[in-house]
Image (tube, helix red, strand yellow):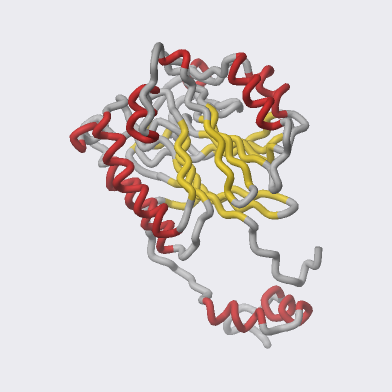
Amino acid sequence: MTTSGLSPRADFTIAHLSDTHFLGGRRRWEGVVDTDAQIASALTQLERSGRRPDAIVLTGDLTDLGEPEAYARLRSIVEPVAESVGAQLVWVMGNHDERPVYARELFGTELAGPAEDHPQDRVYDVRGLRIVSLDSTVPGYHHGDVSAPQLEWLAGILSEPAEHGTLLALHHPPIRTPLELMNILQLQHQDELADVVRGTDVRAVLGGHLHYSTFGTFASIPVSVASATCTTMDLAAPPRTLSQVDGARTFSLVHVYPDGITHSSVPVDEEEPVGLLDEEFLARLEALSPEDRLEAFSRKRPPSGGPA
């Protein structure tokens, strides 16, 4: 890698959002949080950035109670943005979602028989980058699990590498959390899932559920958890409590490069800049040789008013 050159642009950009928790009738979450306004603000930030993501991934708890109108309203906000930027929309089941309503409202599919028999697993091909939406929910419960048939299905999918690798998206992230109560609701049978993904082309795991942004590894694979657009967990609260706050929301941008992958947290709310280097500044740097570029931008300058 040439340290004085400009890094290559990412092959793929993914907008990763999570835990929107919509309620029917546009009710506020706990009577306080305007969930519609928060996801709209996140998408406005995405559009303001000028980036055109290849996919928008929402990793579960799309609704709070699985109400049909809540899914319809979420679609009415998210789908026009995805269409305007040309992004593949990837939905993922969360523990607050309900499989029959999720399948009907998002995919037009009527489930026949018990919900337990119909995990909502799907595969998306985004220009050769495979995104697997894996349903980690347990009907009637809030903890996560992946059944033996699902693991067999996933192993079959991953047996054939994708051109640009795979992103695995599921609601319950397979990593630890310092929030003791949330560990009760973690993903079960993680060892079995690790056996399936280890050594495959899975380049990253995307999760939600925790309501705060965090990172880890699973079977030597990077894991990135997107914060919620509904409420966020206060990790400064006593460790044996669970405190959610109406603020500090972020979503994630995933940049997939030929030789790596990055995950960046983006504030949902727009803030006033206190310093700005604009496009013209970057254009001037791009016109320089790598050596001159490094000299122009990296060399320290004397303090203002100091000796030359």
Give the tally of numbered discs.
0
Is residue 36 positioned above or below 271 on the image? Answer: above
Name the residue: 27% across, 38% down: 33
Place of residue 266 in the rendered image (x, y in percent of width and height, measured from the top left) = 48, 52
Residue 215 showing in the rendered view: no
Residue 219 showing in the rendered view: yes
Is residue 170 positioned above or below 6 on the image? Answer: above
Name the residue: 20% across, 34% down: 27
Residue 130 left/right relative to 118: right
For the N terminus, the image quarter is: bottom right
Q: In this view, which residue lies farthest toward the right? A: 1
Q: In this view, which residue lies farthest toward the bottom? A: 308
Place of residue 290 in the rendered image (x, y in percent of width and height, measured from the top left) = 76, 77
Taking depth in this image into account, of 159 and 301 the one nearest to the observer is 159
Is residue 97 positioned above or below 300 on the image? Answer: above
Name the residue: 58% across, 84% down: 305
The quadrant in which residue 157 appears is top right
Taking depth in this image into account, of 48 and 272 the one nearest to the observer is 48
The quadrant in which residue 116 appears is top left
Place of residue 71 in the rendered image (x, y in percent of width and height, measured from the top left) = 31, 35
Residue 290 left/right relative to 265: right
Residue 283 left/right relative to 191: left
The quadrant in which residue 217 appears is top right
For the C terminus, the image quarter is: bottom right
